[in-house]
Amino acid sequence: AGVRTIGDLARATPDALRRTLGEWGLAAARLARGEDVRDVEPFREAVSMSEENTFGSDVSDRATLEAAILTHAESVARRLRRSELRAHTIVLKLKLGRRVAAGPRGFPQLTRHATLSEASDDGEVLAQTARALLARAELAEPVRLIGVGATNLVPANPDQLGLFDLGGGRERRQRLNRALDVLAERYGSRAVRRAGQADIVHAAPSLALKKGSDLDLQK
């Protein structure tokens, strides 16, 4: 049909398109002309959120790794609360400094998961879990990249307290988190931070959507 560009597709005659491409060609031509009557789906259900950073040089120091974990955990937790979600599963991603192949993917990558007894949107809970995963990894070599993720997401129920939260600790953390969220929205995420957070350059945070999405996975 002599179609090489979107413009060619938009200008092609229906007979030529039907003859060479069938009904699919007619539908593609309508899209090329901007004729689309399908409902717009501005958002699909998120299935995971994560954040990571690559260090300027490979890191072996445990305190530096844990500080980065806390920073990422707080950021992911803030996104969960903004989306009114909580996570049942926490993910720790590690990329080791030892190159084993050419290219940007030529470094060994480790991924560790832990499932919480209760879904959480608390950065301290996410950080504690990720730090435990780091300890279990028993690293024997430096780390190039570290990331924290949250998956197995469920809607948040702000009225539901933990069964064993008799001392009100979780309720106090929820009040603290709300206060931190307000300050972060007003003054930026670096305005007020928990002790021990690292001052790191974040990679673009990721948002994985429900299977079948045709949207970009980077938000």
Image: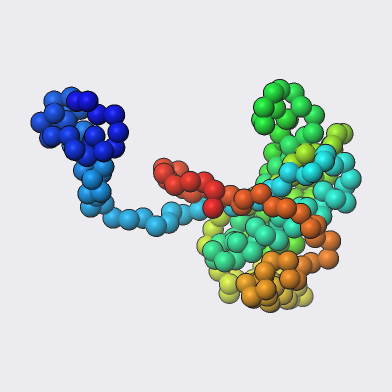
The residue depicted at 55 percent of the width and 69 percent of the height is 157
Q: In the drawing, does residue 35 fall left or right of residue 74? A: left
Q: Name the foreground residue: 90 vs 76.
A: 76
Is any part of residue 164 visible from this angle?
Answer: no
Where residue 153 appears, as percent x and y from the top left, is 56, 55
The residue depicted at 84 percent of the width and 37 percent of the height is 142
The residue depicted at 49 percent of the width and 49 percent of the height is 209
Q: How is the image coloured?
A: rainbow
Q: In the drawing, does residue 8 fall left or right of residue 68? A: left
Where residue 113 appears, as percent x and y from the top left, is 68, 44
Examine the rendered structure and indicate whether residue 203 appears above or below residue 98. Answer: below
The residue depicted at 26 percent of the width and 38 percent of the height is 7
Examine the rendered structure and indicate whether residue 10 appears above or below residue 168. Answer: above
Where residue 128 appears, as percent x and y from the top left, is 77, 56
Is any part of residue 69 visible from this angle?
Answer: yes
Q: Name the foreground residue: 13 vs 178.
A: 13
* Residue 187 placement: quadrant: bottom right
Q: Name the foreground residue: 7 vs 144.
A: 7
Examine the rendered structure and indicate whether residue 138 appears above or below residue 153. Answer: above
Q: Please, which residue is most extreme toward the left here?
A: 15
Q: How many marks?
A: 0
Q: Name the foreground residue: 34 vs 111.
A: 34
Where residue 78 appears, as percent x and y from the top left, is 64, 64
State which quarter of the image contains the N terminus. top left
* Residue 5 placement: quadrant: top left
